[in-house]
Amino acid sequence: MRNAFAAAVTAHHNREDCFFLTGDLGFMALEDIKTAFGNRFINTGIAEQNMIGVAAGLARENMKVFVYSIAPFCYARPFEQIRNDICLSDLSVCLVGNGGGYAYGQMGPTHHALEDCAAMNALGVQVLVPAFDADIASVIRGFSSPTYLRLGFDERPEGAPVPQYAPWRQVLTGEFGAIAALGPLAGVAWQALLDVPAALRPSVWAVTEFNDKEIPDEFWTQVSEKTLFTIEEHVVAGGLGMHVALAMIHKGIHVSKFVHRYALGYPTGRFGSQAFHRAQCGIDSDGVRDMLMEAKR
């Protein structure tokens, strides 16, 4: 998604009041932004805490600022600076974490972002998890407060058209309840269930924002007295599943079964590719199909 992100920033945010900061990352992807922004593109070096301070200073001068790094270096390493410098003053800074979840694969836990959405949401940061490349221009167009953008990979079925952007979108119809899938996992679920007859599969909803108020009534109608599935490449604490469960209680919705698949960390103590870790957690295509079969038993 980072190429789509770079294109969206260049097309929609190349203005005198917008800066782009990177922690010595983004090679072979951010060159067009660097060319377009000129002196407003700043490589702060491998100094993420300082980068957040610089971003906060620029934002205090009424600038909009993008801060780009590998996801854990964007939200975890400078957590205190995000809280104190950006959030307490409600500044217009968009933190861009590339490689959400297990995306950095064999580089191991230091490069994985499994609790990022919960950590940022706890600070009151707007959390955005695009499902498809086409989402990015929409989600970053109007940010005006602390924002966290989690980038992954567009994994929808090849050639499948992307529905018009909304925080919650149905991308596949079905009659066996519904799946709420966080970000790119919507594409994984879409692909996994595409060949299953509609009467035997759940509908698939792509969720891109952590905002319970955005959940459509149509989703609640589909899961009422049926099975509600949630899948996410994120730990259980503070993730999509918890948000949906709390919203369900507040709405007074009753489901026959609640099934939640999420990042389990490292159950075997081994590290590998993103595909390896997804399979371990049951959140790959095979895991989605197995989840459906188990729910029918």
Image: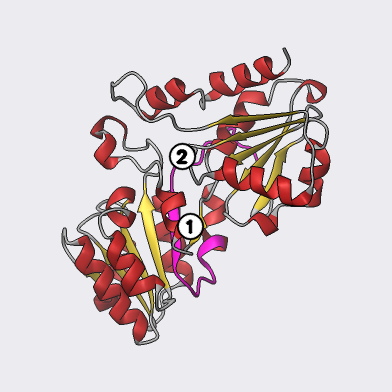
Q: Which residues are magenta?
A: 139-161
Residue at 81%, 47% in the rendered image? 218
Between the residue at mark 1 and the residue at mark 2, the CA separation in whole angstroms equals 13 Å
The tally of labels here is: 2
Residue 115: x and y, percent?
Answer: 41, 45
Residue at 31%, 81% in the rendered image? 58
Kind of residue sitting beneath label 2: His
Q: Which residue is mark 2?
A: 234
Q: Which residue is mark 1?
A: 121
Q: Which quadrant would the C terminus be assigned to in this image?
A: top right
Q: Is residue 175 magenta?
A: no
User: From where the camera sits, is residue 166 visible?
Assistant: no
Q: Is residue 28 left or right of residue 229?
A: left
Residue 287: x and y, percent?
Answer: 55, 21
Q: Quadrant of residue 18?
A: bottom left
Dot 2 falls on a residue whose secondary structure is loop
Predominant SS along the magenta part: loop
Residue at 79%, 26% in the rendered image? 198
Q: Quadrant of residue 290?
A: top right
Q: Is residue 217 above or below residue 78?
A: above
